[in-house]
Amino acid sequence: MSKLKDDNQPKNQSPRRIIVFKVISIFISVLLLCFIEIALRIFNYGYDVSLFVEYPDDKRFFVLNPNASKRYFTNQKIATTGNVELFKKVKDKNTTRIFVLGESTTIGYPYFHNGSFHRWLQYRLTHTFPDRNFEIINIALTAVNSYTTFGFAKEVVDYEPDAVLIYTGHNEYYGALGVGSTEKIGGNPQLVNLILRLRQLRMVQLMTNAYEKLQSLVGPNKASSGGTRMKLMVADQQIPYQSELYKRGIEQFRSNMDATLELLTKRDIPVFVSNLVSNEKDLKPFVSFPVDSLKFPRFKPNYALGLAALNRKNTAEAYRYLKAANQVYSAHALCNYYLGQLAYQQGDFKQAQRYFSKARDLDGLRFRAPAELNTIINQLCRTHKNAHLVDTKAVFEANSAHRIIGDELILEHVHPDLRGYALLSDAFYEAMKKERLITVPPPTEMSLTQLLQAMPITKVDSLAGLYKVTNLKRNWPFSEVMAATPFTVKTVEEKLAYDLTFKQLPWSDAMSKAYDYHISIHDLRQAKKITEALTLEYPTDAPYYEKAAMLSGELNDNANAAFYFKKAFALAPSFDKARYLFVLYLRQDRPVEAMPYLDYAIQNNTSQFNLSPVKASAEQVIDLQQAYARDSSNVFILNQIARAYFRMDNKDGASKYLHKVLTVDATNKDALVLMSRIH
């Protein structure tokens, strides 16, 4: 019996043999996983989540991958997509390339397109530096946070950025993977970033899809069953100030932003990080937690008496009772907000600002970034040598009544109005100037005032923004704290904006219909504004520039006509564009700039005109201008320049120099004779 037992015992195996077996088992498992991954890719299962892909309509360009956001969302149905903004695979020497990272404010909600701050910046830079090409690629998304900022930054560094601009923080709790979001997968930033890397694998995508299908069989998916995206993203509607969950959100932001700035600093890429602004004065806290009556028995009666006095508009009594309640318990969001309002009415604006700021931080529904995030941004910008603080908060305060930010610049809780987006762009612009990323020649610089007047924001875009915000305020959580502004839908532009808002019409179609309408009523200024808007949206399409140039010419805006023809010519050179350009430059007395286009027109002449005499006259003007620079008292030279322009049939140029002659010598016969011939 004992012998039988001994025979059934496994023979002792050497440790070396066991190790070999284990290594082989692991190797086979890894090999099998690699085989499955390769097979899934061969059969095109899943999706590529690379940040950029080749633009299908023109292989010279890259564009933001519409699937790039999917790694951040467990529920693919609510994954967001961003802008379609092209940039060249091979960067031109004359190009400044800037990437923009962030969330809904960064992408320009509710206006999008040319309402976004980066388009205000693009317009200003291209008009200030007409001979330089700026690629400002906004890869911000709605409903994301610092995880996406860090994830996108890791890929952006490989695409030759001259700078990176960042505005992020308001979505830290409820954006994808936020600690209070329906899309969270863990509270540790290192663990989350590991899972994000794994989500690039097709096997992981297969498992995720299988899990979603199993969930749908068990019951409806709460995260995609109606409601606004804001509501769908929120799991924890109550996150108390300084609670464990609150602190995890703070640490999440600090960790991701620190990693982002460290990465960009190591690659020697300048990064401009804006602090955050929100509506403090004109938005009540969404959630104010009840106060424990046993611990703080005097709070409730004082608070109730304060509210009653407020309703009676007895501000002095309301302030007294609410202040007494706040002394008993100082962490009640609404009590602080009402005290802020009362201090504001009494003219104590510094105290009002402190109350409003505290009320925002105590708000249990964390749709507005607490002040701690701005502190972190400030600290990190001091820590990382290539990181530069953009003090948007100071700019907004300087443009707000009594330096308290409210609905003069903010539409609801965090998104600026159009003037606010212009100010946000100005804050970045000035920071870039300060750090000498751009060196601006004063004579050609477009000021903020000029930008506000010239920026081509169409009425359709402006109205669509209003309609979106009005619709937002009718839904949770705004319906409880803000009134929705009524709007009408009667005019052509209002109808187009309404259709655009509720996705019955693509933006390009809305612009096309608006353009046709303004042309039909001969409103060339609005038609020109639309074509300028289209050049910002489609900066690689020459026909939009050409159309903007033609309309500028019809409006006698020669400077902009030349600007847009030059952009069109750079994209698609032609004899006609060259002819327009040299005529416009000569008309504006800019013969040196006219010469390259005169040469091109002569070499590619498709007309019956002999342009050689025009070139000879232009060269004569250049020589005469140089002579006049040496002897500015020589009236004879001025008359010669006027005659040269007259021979070219350039009456504007001739008149300019004749006026100079007659200012010095009102009886000059040559000038008077030539002036009479012009008129």
Image (cartoon, helix red, strand yellow):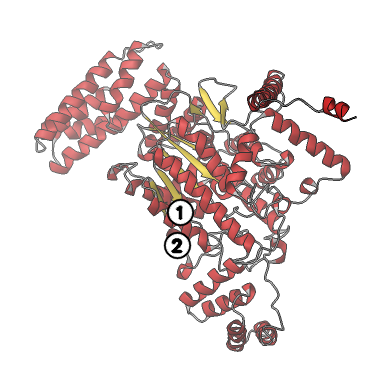
Q: Which residue is mark 2?
A: 399
Q: Which mark is residue 679?
A: none
Q: Residues within 10 Å of mark 1 (few under 14, many from 20)?
A: many
The alpha-carbon separation of the residues under discs 1 and 2 comes to: 9 Å
Identify the secondary structure beneath mark 2: loop
Residue at image position (64%, 40%) is 195
Residue 554 x/y as whole percent: 45, 34
Q: Are marks 1 and 2 in contact (CB under 8 Å)?
A: yes
Identify the secondary structure beneath mark 1: helix
Q: Is residue 506 above or below residue 417?
A: above
Q: Is residue 32 above or below residue 257?
A: above
Residue 610 x/y as whole percent: 32, 12
Residue 121 visible here: no
Q: Which mark is residue 423?
A: 1
Give the quarter of the image for residue 454: top left
Q: Is residue 569 above or below residue 155?
A: above
Q: Nearer the viewer, residue 382 or 317?
A: 382
Q: Is residue 3 above or below residue 303?
A: above
For badge 1, the amino acid type reads Leu
Q: Residue furthest front?
A: 2
Q: Earlier in the sequence, mark 1 or mark 2?
A: 2
**Looking at the rendering, in which quadrant would you find the N terminus?**
top right
Q: Nearer the viewer, residue 446 or 75?
A: 75
Give the quarter of the image for residue 134: top left
